[in-house]
Image: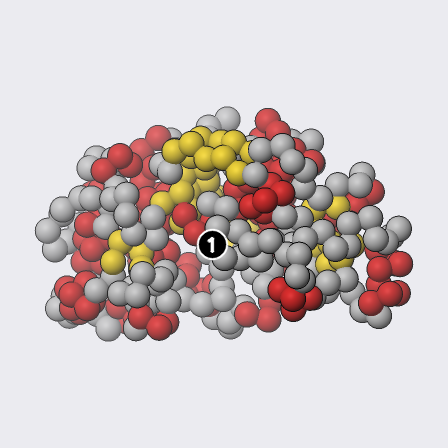
C-alpha cells in the first residue's frame, strides 16, 4: 500500500490562511510522492462546532484545488471506537479516573510547569480510586480519564523540526484521553483514527509538536508501535504579536477572500511565498508541484502582515 497522509480540519471555525498553508504543504508532499490523502473532519468538540463550517471548509479546499482520495471521515461517527480504546487502557492499568478540575490542577502547590508555562498534572488521582464508578461516586459527576506516563524518554526524528526528546514525567505529565462527558480527548481520538486509516505521514503546525510524544505513548499502549507515523511539524503563520493566526489579527479567512472576489491563484501565490517559492501574483496548486521543496520552507514563523492582506485584496475582481 502507498503511504497515507490526512487533512484534518476542525469545523469549529473557518479555514484561515495559516491552516491553508499547512494543508497546501501536506497536499504538495502527497501529490509529489504518491501518498494517498484521507480527509478527516475533527468534530469531537461539539459545543464549538459551528453550523455550516464543514461545508465552508470543503468548499475552500475545492476552491484552492486541494483534493483528497478518501473521506470525509467524521470523528462524531466513531465515538464507539474511541470509547473502546479508552476502556482497554483502563482495564490494562495504563489509564485511571481523575476527579480533578482544571482549577484543581492549577491550584495544586506541587504542580510542575512545562517549559511553555503549561501546568503539568501532578498525579493527584494516580491509584486513588479502584474504578471509574468509585471516582464518579466520590465526585458526584462524570470524571476524566488520564493516561499514566512513565519515566522512559520519548525520542523521535521529525522530518522538518529534527531530533526531538521528551521527558514524559517532567514535560508531559499524565494527560487526558477521555473527557468527563464520556467523549474521547484529542490525543486518543487522533491515534485511533490515524491507526485505522493506516496513516503513515502526519504534517501539521509545530504548535502540536508536544502532542507527538503523547500520541507515541498511546500508540505503544494500544500495541501499535509499528504504526507510529512519520511526523513533520511546520512553523506557524502568526500575527504581529507573534501568536498564531486568529480573529484577533483581523479577517484572514480563506472564505472571506473567496467571497470578495480574490482569485484562488492569488491566494495560492501568497501561500507559495510562505513556502519559499516566488511565483509572482498567480499560481495554481498543480503549478506548484514541480517547484515545491520542503527544505526551502522558512525555519521561522511566517508573519501575516497588512501588506499580505493588501496583496490579496488588490487582486479582487
Residue farthest toward the left in the current orientation of the protein: 280
Q: Find residue 236 and report its horizontal and vertical position in percent.
A: 34, 53
Q: Nearer the viewer, residue 22 or 165?
A: 165
Task: Please state if 23 lies on the left or on the right of 296 as rendered.
Answer: right
User: Residue at left 25%, top 44%?
Assistant: 298
Q: Is residue 252 above or below residue 175?
A: below
Q: Quadrant of residue 304?
A: bottom left
Q: Is residue 56 above or below residue 119?
A: below
Which quarter of the rendering shows the C terminus? Answer: bottom left
User: Residue at left 26%, top 54%?
Assistant: 302
Q: Which residue is mark 1?
A: 116
Q: Is residue 252 something one can see in this rendering?
A: yes
Task: Please state if 311 lies on the left or on the right of 135 as rendered.
Answer: left
User: Residue at left 25%, top 58%?
Assistant: 303
User: Residue at left 40%, top 49%?
Assistant: 205
The secondary structure type at the circle numbered 1 is loop
Q: Quadrant of residue 110?
A: bottom right
Task: Please state if 182 lies on the left or on the right of 191 as rendered.
Answer: right
Q: Nearer the viewer, residue 307 or 37?
A: 307
Q: Find residue 84 and report its horizontal and vertical position in percent.
A: 75, 46
Q: Find residue 128 and report its horizontal and vertical position in percent.
A: 83, 53
Q: Nearer the viewer, residue 93 or 61?
A: 93
Q: Is residue 316 above or below residue 205?
A: below
Amino acid at each position: 500500500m502507498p503511504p497515507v497522509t490526512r487533512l484534518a480540519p476542525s469545523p469549529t471555525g473557518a479555514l484561515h490562511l495559516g491552516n491553508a498553508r499547512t494543508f497546501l504543504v501536506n497536499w504538495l508532499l502527497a501529490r509529489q510522492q504518491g501518498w494517498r490523502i484521507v480527509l478527516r473532519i475533527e468534530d469531537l468538540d461539539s459545543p464549538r462546532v459551528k453550523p455550516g463550517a464543514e461545508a465552508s471548509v470543503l468548499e475552500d479546499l475545492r476552491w484552492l484545488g486541494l483534493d483528497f482520495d478518501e473521506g470525509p471521515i467524521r470523528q462524531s461517527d466513531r465515538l464507539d471506537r474511541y470509547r473502546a480504546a479508552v476502556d482497554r487502557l483502563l482495564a490494562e492499568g495504563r489509564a485511571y479516573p481523575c476527579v480533578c478540575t482544571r482549577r484543581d490542577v492549577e491550584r495544586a502547590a506541587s504542580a510542575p510547569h512545562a517549559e511553555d508555562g503549561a501546568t503539568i498534572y501532578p498525579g493527584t488521582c494516580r491509584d486513588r480510586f479502584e474504578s471509574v464508578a468509585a471516582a464518579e461516586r466520590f465526585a458526584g459527576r462524570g470524571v476524566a480519564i488520564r493516561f499514566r506516563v512513565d519515566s522512559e524518554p520519548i525520542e523521535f526524528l521529525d522530518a522538518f523540526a529534527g531530533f526531538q526528546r521528551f521527558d514524559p514525567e517532567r514535560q508531559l505529565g499524565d494527560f487526558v484521553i477521555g473527557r468527563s462527558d464520556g467523549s474521547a480527548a484529542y490525543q486518543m481520538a487522533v491515534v485511533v483514527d490515524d491507526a485505522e486509516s493506516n496513516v503513515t505521514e502526519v504534517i501539521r503546525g509545530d504548535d502540536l509538536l508536544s502532542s507527538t510524544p503523547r500520541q507515541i505513548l498511546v500508540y505503544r499502549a494500544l500495541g501499535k508501535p509499528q504504526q507510529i507515523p512519520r511526523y513533520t511539524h511546520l512553523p506557524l503563520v502568526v500575527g504581529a504579536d507573534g501568536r498564531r493566526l486568529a480573529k484577533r489579527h483581523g479577517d484572514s479567512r480563506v472564505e472571506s477572500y473567496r467571497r470578495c472576489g480574490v482569485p484562488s491563484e492569488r491566494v495560492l501565490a501568497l501561500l507559495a511565498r510562505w513556502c519559499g517559492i516566488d511565483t509572482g501574483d498567480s499560481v495554481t496548486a498543480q503549478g506548484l508541484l514541480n517547484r515545491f521543496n520542503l527544505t526551502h520552507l522558512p525555519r521561522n514563523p511566517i508573519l501575516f502582515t497588512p501588506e499580505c492582506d493588501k496583496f490579496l485584496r488588490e487582486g479582487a475582481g
